[in-house]
Image (spheres, coloured by chain):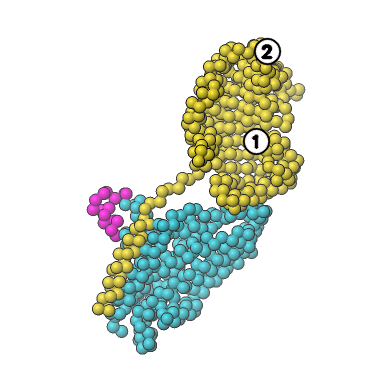
Amino acid sequence: MRRVAWLVAFAALLGLSAFLMSRGDKPKKPERVLKAEFPRHPRDWEEERNRKRRTLPPAAPRPGEDEGIQRKRDPLLVALPVEKGKSSVVFEVAALKESPIGQIWLDCMLEEQAENKRRGRGRDDFKERFGIDLLQDVERIAMSSSKVAVLSVAQGAGRFDKSGWPKRTFGEKGAIWEDTEGRSVFATWGDELVLAGVDVKEIEAAIARLESKSPPQAPPIPDWSAYGDIYGVLSPEELADMLPEEQGEIAARIRAAIDRVDLHVDTSEDVAIVADVNGSNMDDVTDLAKSMGAALSLARAGAEDQGDDRLRELLDYATIKPRDGRFTVDVALPLEVLKQMGPCRKRDAAPSSSQ
Amino acid sequence: MKSFVVARDLLREAASRRWFLALGLGITLMLVVMGLSLRMDVVDGALAATRLFGKSMNTQIRAADVALRPAFVASSYLIFYGGLLFGVVACADFGPSLLAPGRIEHLLSLPVRRFELVVGTFLGVLALALLGALYGAGGLVLIFGVKTGVFSGRLIVSALLASVTFSAIYGAMLTVAIAARSAALSAASGGALVLLGIVAGERERIAEFFDSGISRTIFRGLTLFLPRVSSLARSAGEIAGSEPVDPAALTSMLLGLVVFGLAALSLGIHLFERKDF
């Protein structure tokens, strides 16, 4: 009996082990792998698109420049304010609308639309008044911190006649509508650009730049930098101002060491952000890269201590890559995290706030 | 209690073997070389630069624990599969040497019961696997910890998982050694079990390639009893890389693996009890 006991134990244990191991067999739901394509240069189709967008005749060459190398310009980029120390960002609305995060946020925005309509500030009301469907007619929106927005719209979409605001012409192709209370200014240039702002002088200056024949000032966003679904340039001063007070030291170093920050965002899968940080002093820029890496690391540790998993996860994907006197900040934002932000945040927050 | 004495004797025997001396020296050499040649520049918890033998390896600046994850995952797989293969080859001879003519008669003349000899040999190899894995993983954790300030116990947990997997496979190897008294067959059975275990770890996915019916049922039936080596290696990697693991599935699989080792050991004891020396 004792001899058989080990054999019985073997059979029983083998059966038990098979049972236990099979319970762990369920194929694990595959983890969603982060798919972020960091935009580092324009793709072929973007270069082709940009070429088609250059419809503005070349300006006169600068003294000493060969006329032969002048090429046409993108009117939207030319219209942007060229004032130093200001940021400008372009949103490719058509591409953003088609992106996964764009679709998700659009759903939330449409849900909100009914509510907004009741308040008389919905998308339909805007279209009724100004003739522009913000989702259908706008191809690109360029925003400047000079409080000027330039919209590239479908031909003839910008019609402000129903606004009831007084209209005047400006330059060859410009028309300006000014709110009688002086709070808002809209303008069209030709049938493809709409300009909006609060300061009529900024709008007039933009139209003047578009129609100027004299040698141009370099636009804030050069042609070569027009790639990604969102792109632009951030001024060091405004970037430093965005940092919280406790990051005062880094803010001061940003102001001192950085000349410009080029921003590019790809939203074709998860959202990938690349910020190219350039400065004239290689050592200062390298030191700043290390300081920013340390700040990100400390912020991540802080988020972990406070149990803020969402922020910790976001900071997990933040890297800084120093090279040749400049550095790149890469940040990937997973869709799962972004789903709970932006216009969807209000919807998700509503039930908890009501509790 | 007497099993522990047998296990201690096995550890003494292992210490005198070239295989294990080479393993100990190899791990020590690797740790010393890494310790001396690896330079890591850490600023407030962010890994700013890494140099191995003076050559820049990493130009990204990111949180040190995040930057170290790929290194921990790679180390985990190295310890897991490297440890399994080394263990299968180096430990295959312990069973047959226990049964060597002259030695077994001497052992059986001592006041030790037969099953205690088998259990002692198994425990000795388990201790050996644990020591090797902990030395390698612990050394790496210490080196990375001293250089970056990130002391993560996850790689040690991952190494423990590898040790448990090997000990279960060794249970089967010991049984084959008792049945055949052959180190070569023992090693071959261990190697086969590792390979089959890799397949068994993916059985759900592989089963889909079989036509539903008898062939799929046979495949499922055959792999049902095998240790899920690749699943455990993946879990070990996930633990080392701070990725989420399903604790219920892992616990169940780990318990199943321990019970598999005990089952193999029971069969080995049964065969040993029936042997006439």
Residue A313 within the segment the image draws in magenta: no
In the rendered image of this protein, which colour is used for chain A? yellow
Q: Are marks 2 and 1 on the same chain?
A: yes
Q: Secondary structure at mark 1?
A: strand
The cyan-coloured chain is labelled B
Which residue is label 2 attached to?
Answer: A170
Q: In front: A350, or B92?
A: A350
Query: Hey, what amino acid is under mark 1?
Result: Asp
Query: Reading the chain from its start, which is encountered first: label 2 or label 1?
Result: 2
| Residue A37 rendering spot, x and y as whole percentages | 53, 40
Query: Hey, what amino acid is under mark 2?
Result: Phe
Judged left or right of residue A350, residue B42 is right
Number of other residues with Cα within 10 Å of mark 1, as a class: few under 14, some 14 to 19, many 20 or more:
many
Residue drawn at the location 38% of the way across and 80% of the way down:
B117
The chain identifier of the residue carrying mark 2 reads A
| Residue A291 rendering spot, x and y as whole percentages | 69, 48
Residue drawn at the location 50% of the way across and 27% of the way down:
A115
Which residue is label 1 attached to?
Answer: A262
Q: Which residues are magenta?
A: B208-222
